[in-house]
Image: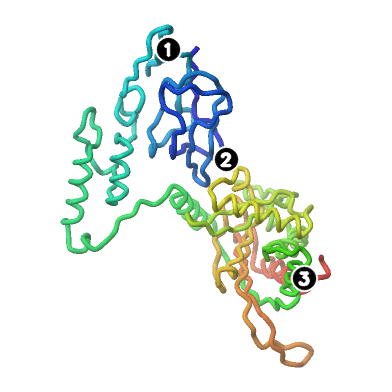
Amino acid sequence: MVNEFRLPDIGEGLTDAEVVTWHVAVGDAVTVDQLLVEVETAKAIVEITSPYAGVVLHLGAAEGEDVAVGEILLVIGAAGEIWSADGTSAPDVPPVVDVAATSPAAGTARPGRVKAVPIVRKLARDRGVDLSTITGTGPGGAITRDDVLGAAEREATGSTAAASDERVTMSRLRRTIAENMTRSWREIPHVTAQADLDASRLLAAHRDLRQRTGGPIPLEALVARAVIPSLREYPEFNATLDGSELILKRRYDIGFAVDTREGLVVVVTRGTDGMDPETLADRIRQLAEAARARKAAPDDLAGQTFTISNIGALGGGPGTPIIPWGTTAILSIGRAIDTPVVRDGGIFVAPVAPLNLSYDHRVIDGALGQRFLSSLVANLEQIDTLL
């Protein structure tokens, strides 16, 4: 029996995925739960296993090609069966591997798809050539090696400026970041409020926690403990604007910005208010490691109700963070620098860190933004009492 395995919706808002690595080929026998393929979604690389046992009859895309949700990823049937694109199959016939049926890169074109085999795609990436700009001269309009080399030469000799520039195709994650940032900046009226934080007690609590646990502790774990009481007091900052209605979230799924080689990723800890600092720190570390390895589950990369970005860990200072779409606010904390401060009429040197709170001005006015920020500063400056 022929089974057409179509790309499932493996993440929130997923519309398609790029095939990264096939672990099977046409003619291979597979078992249930065997690893079939790695695909790259907007935020992670996901391993897909087989729901069927049998023999691989057809691969729906070559490595480097996109597959839309609901399109055929691969076809699995019985030994001796042949599958064709019109959905028919013939049992008990010696298997014949038809290259055109096996790889859409060399077969009938699907609408909007670039036709090129993996080796040509790699050549295009190495030469900085955008395949979508090339008209293929190969069979069925497929792009050939000569097509890519010709395009690269034309770009190189097109102008003096072009000869010294490098054209790099953005990764799927980078494109997703660009789209999300553009949407947030275009549709959310941002206001950023800034405050200086005397981080003396925060850093002392951080040192004590590291000594007690004997391991690295993300500072964000302590910042989150101070944020949650302020979110409870001012729920507009833990909300989603839906048309004319504001949805006040009564859960505290805090997002934490993670710097990865591919770009900024936000990992989400569910039920953050129910975690002690040690548990929260462990969870942040686990998710950050998974995100950097592109192995984080889709559910761990979406759905935050509020976001914290510790740009101080990278040496950053004041900034204007962009609000993630679907939320109303984001907090960034910069690096603490020894600064003269006034306490009880005296001048002391203390580590002072900049806090930057961006919020949605459709929902939050300046006065409310300042009250939230003042509440947060007070919590952070007496973090030891909250712990």
Quickly name the residue at label 3.
208
Residue at 34% from the left image edge and 54% from the top image edge: 168
As helix, strand or loop, the secondary structure at mark 1 comes to loop
Residue 292 rendering spot, x and y as whole percentages: 55, 53
Pointer 2 with pointer 1, Cβ within 8 A: no
Check the image and name the residue furthest to the bottom.
346
| Residue at 47% across, 49% down | 173
Q: Where is residue 170 in the image (x, y as percent from the top left)?
A: 39, 52
Task: Give the position of the C terminus as an image quadrant.
Answer: bottom right
Residue corresponding to mark 2: 12
* CB atoms of marks 3 and 1 within 8 Å: no
Alpha carbon separation for disc pair 3 and 2:
39 Å
The residue under label 3 is which amino acid type?
Asp
Give the x, y percent position of residue 109. Answer: 31, 28
The amino acid beneath tag 2 is Glu
Q: Residue at x 48, y 21 (%)?
A: 29
Three-letter amino acid code of the residue under disc 1: Glu
